[in-house]
Image (tube, rainbow, N blue to C red):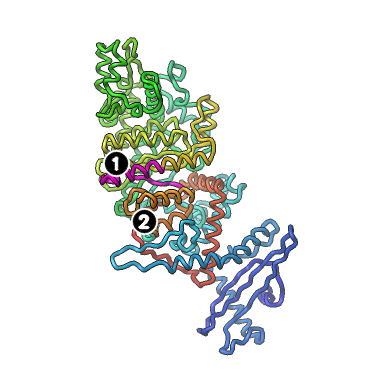
Amino acid sequence: MAQLRSLSTQRTTIKFVCYTRNSSGSSNGTFAAAAAAAASVNNGKRYQQRCLHTATCSSSGSRIGSSNILQRQQQQQLLLLLWQNQFVSSARCLHSAAREQQAQVAIAEVLDESGRRGAAKGAAKSVQPPQEGQPQRDPLDVSFNDPIAAFKSKTTWELVRAYMVYMVCSSEKLVEHNMKLLKVARTVLGSRLFVILMKSSFYGHFVAGENRHTIVPTLERLRSFGVKPILDYSVEEDISQEEAEKREVESSVSSAGDNVKDAGALPQYHVDKSFADRRYKVSSARTYFYLNEATCERNMETFIKCLEAVSGATFGTGITAIKLTALGRPQLLLQLSEVIMRTRKYMEALVGGQGNVLTHHKTIKDLEKYYASVGDNKDVQAFLQNVTSDKEGILHLFPWSGIVDEDSQLSDTFRVPDPITGQMRRLISQIEPKEEEMFRNMIRRLNTIVKTAAELDVRIMIDAEQTYFQPAISRITLEMMRKYNKDKAIVFNTYQCYLREAFREVGTDLEQAKRQNFYFGAKLVRGAYMEQERARAQALGYADPVNPNFEATTDMYHKTLAECLRRIKVLKDSGEDARKIGIMVASHNEDTVRFAIENMKSIGISPEDKVICFGQLLGMCDYITFPLGQAGYSAYKYIPYGPVEEVLPYLSRRAQENKGVLKKIQKEKRLLASEIRRRLFRGQLFYKPKGNYVPI
């Protein structure tokens, strides 16, 4: 009380702003504000401060100070308001020298706030109320600097919580030891208090809820503001590095032994103990470690429950993300990936050039010429009969459709003839019958998931993984597209644009979709495994698969996206269904989002065409996602859910990922602070979000 009474007579160095509304109903609103400024140690400049006290005014507008009674009433009102509002702690003064610079930055923001607020008002005024029967649409600020559009879906408490979370993510020491701190907090507080703490902080910000039922309110609110969900059950095993390495090595080597030293073997596609813990230097992707077939069955059931949750809450516009390493033994993906790359090398040696088999544009007759000296060999003739081709040439040397749809044996399938002797050579090491059965189980699980998705009208996005798994993952995913994407895109593949081959791989797969007449779905990301991939390539002695720098990755992303847009335009101009190509721009980079929007406009692709969508993680870059959704673009949030104590590894990775994007954090914090102040000044502390938007 003594501090409050002295505000009108003393200059202070605190940063504190208070607000109170006239309680008498007088036409002249009254405000009490204390604006603070800290003296700069470096340049000696001083900011003047004063605290303006006003209370209920008489009709003559007399000032406070003449009456002790009125002064006490004003003080009591102020204290009551402070007690009622939970977020006041975030506006308390910064007393330490270490935070003085933050106080000065905050004051500077107050000074230029009117300009930004004016821009936001202008945008708000231009919003036209929707006509009856039409969904609400807002104009899009492509600079993504409108805090109202960014946070109109949030309560004030959620804004304060987000600001506090980003403050913690800005501390390198806290983020570096976040998992240890979380475990200590759980031990000290006990399970119940720890859960309450997490729900009011990190868990509440980054995770939608504990199960498929508790997340429904979050999904419904997102939908009311024009945003759709990508559901992901984010429970992760918290196992030690030793346990992870043990599991990975055991599940990545055939019971017949590792053939890494065999002629033609590619070391990249064999496990190395130094990198067996696939979480190494990976902060933005979840990792599954194979334990047994029963665990894979449970993972399949979890993915199906995600599909059911999405279907029930989003009316067919939702997506579920899955990983193939959750559905089977990693050894099989390693071996298939090696087969694919050895097949490419075989084709390059046979006909020259480089790249995927499809890109060579060779026909069966061309192959017959290469095998002319051994053309009478029955094995060679049988091989040629199984080559997948169309009128434009060869698509695959092997019958992949049979491998995915039927019970073809892998060991017998992946053989190619020696063009000189005619002898059939294996491109895959011998696979034991039990391992063949494991492969069939993995394909069965994936088929079950995709079939369920098709029945529920929910889309499946198969996540990209490390380069030593990715050839197999992409090949299997393309076959699922061929099988299920006959009328629309149900299955989407993921392409990591930090890879040097990203543009070529997307182009090849687009060509296959065109020639085999199925709908192509792709999610474009920058990628999650860059540091690990570089370190592994250097250690094992193979070419670095990663682009040299961030700018090269951005160029690759934009080049790949532009090619997809070009092909969409070709479809549209020729009168074909433009939705035969569907692209998700999954990026937190606003320059990339702007690039997509500008290119869509320049070539005549509208949001209503439903061929381009955008996606960001829950709790990150709301200033991009929500304005897009409210402007009529197809916008998604990646929605993790799961029990509090079982999603701690996910939360740890989110903290690590945010530490690496400090520039984005600073912008998000600035916009959050701007919106909190706006609500404070306008008396909207208890604002309740209510949207009237319909996702496209």
Name the mark nearer the viewer: 1 or 2: 1
Residue extending furthest toward the right: 44
Q: Going 63% across and 64% down the picture, which residue do you hit?
A: 107
Question: What is the span of residues highlighted in magenta in the rendered image?
Answer: 561-588
Q: Going 30% across and 19% down the picture, which residue do you hit?
A: 367
Q: Check the picture and name the quadrant holding the C terminus.
A: bottom left
Dividing the picture into quadrants, the one containing residue 81 is bottom right
The verdict on residue 466 being magenta is no
* Residue sitting nearer the eye, 45 or 18: 45
Question: Is residue 641 in sight in this rendering?
Answer: no
Label 2 amino acid?
A: Val
N-terminal of the two: label 1 or label 2? 2
Label 1 amino acid?
A: Tyr
Residue 688 horizontal/vertical position (percent): 43, 67
Residue 416 horizontal/vertical position (percent): 33, 18
Q: Residues within 10 Å of mark 2 (few under 14, many from 20)?
A: some
Residue at which label 1 appears: 519
* Residue sitting nearer the eye, 126 or 413: 126
Label ID, residue 216: 2
